[in-house]
Image (cartoon, rainbow, N blue to C red):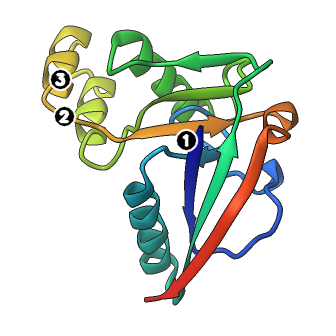
């Protein structure tokens, strides 16, 4: 499968040592199957960190012989999974790779109201049903990283 990673950082080798914490699926290397989404991620990072050069990485990735979890959509299991990883930090599971919807800035306010006790699970899932989230595939183990092959890297100035 082809996956993309957008960044404001130029690198030649993926390392989990630089992974950010408290992410949807835990600390890991995040990609998407949607090229345009990765481009927007790169541009957002450049704006956030005041850098001028954006990078788009295209990889070929194989999930063969990996312990993976796929969320087909927003569900109670997905909601609990992302909350646990974001609140606890680190990696709160034993998967090599996780794939599913992104809890982005459009979705997270609803999740925050759930966490604050304003919404129950049923109402939260009803509200989230109206969103069409993009997807993400996160890599959490050296074994999974070995299945990631860089095909192309492009860059541009903002």
Q: Earlier in the sequence, mark 1 or mark 3?
A: 1
- The part of the image, by quadrant, that contains residue 39 is bottom left
Comparing 41 with 65, the one in front is 65
Is label 2 in contact with label 1 (beta carbons under 8 Å)? no
Comparing 140 with 61, the one in front is 61
Residue at the (22%, 17%) spot, across then down: 125
Residue 61 rendering spot, x and y as whole percentages: 68, 39
Q: Is residue 39 left or right of residue 26?
A: left
Work out whether 98 lies above or below 47. above
Other residues around mark 3 within 10 Å, as few (<14) / some (14–19) / many (≥20): few
Which quarter shows the C terminus?
A: bottom left
- Residue hosting label 2: 131
Q: CA distance from mark 3 to mark 2?
A: 6 Å
Residue 93 rendering spot, x and y as whole percentages: 68, 19
- Residue hosting label 3: 129
Is label 3 in contact with label 2 (beta carbons under 8 Å)? yes
Residue at the (19%, 34%) spot, across then down: 131
Comparing 75 with 153, the one in front is 153
Q: CA distance from mark 1 to mark 3?
A: 21 Å
Looking at the rendered structure, the secondary structure element under dot 3 is loop
Tell me the number on the disc at residue 158. Answer: none
The mark lying in front, picked from 1 and 3, is 3
The mark lying in front, picked from 2 and 1, is 2
Which quarter shows the N terminus?
A: top right
- Residue 155 seen by the camera: yes
Tell me the number on the disc at residue 23. Answer: 1
Residue 141 rendering spot, x and y as whole percentages: 81, 33
Residue 10 rendering spot, x and y as whole percentages: 70, 76
């Amino acid at each position: 499968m082809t996956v993309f990673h957008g960044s404001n950082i130029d690198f030649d080798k993926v390392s989990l040592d630089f992974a950010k914490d408290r992410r949807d699926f835990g600390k890991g290397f995040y990609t998407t199957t949607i090229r345009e989404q990765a481009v927007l991620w790169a541009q957002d990072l450049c704006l956030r960190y005041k850098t001028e050069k954006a990078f788009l990485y295209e990889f070929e990735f194989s999930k063969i012989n990996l312990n993976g979890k796929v969320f087909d959509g927003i569900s109670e299991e997905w909601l609990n999974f992302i909350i646990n990883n974001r609140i606890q930090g680190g990696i709160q599971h034993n998967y090599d790779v996780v794939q599913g919807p992104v809890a982005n800035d459009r979705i997270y306010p609803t999740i925050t109201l759930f966490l604050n006790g304003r919404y129950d699970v049923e109402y939260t899932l009803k509200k989230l049903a109206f969103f069409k989230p993009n997807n993400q595939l996160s890599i959490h183990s050296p074994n999974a990283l070995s299945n990631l092959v860089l095909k192309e890297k492009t860059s541009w100035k903002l």
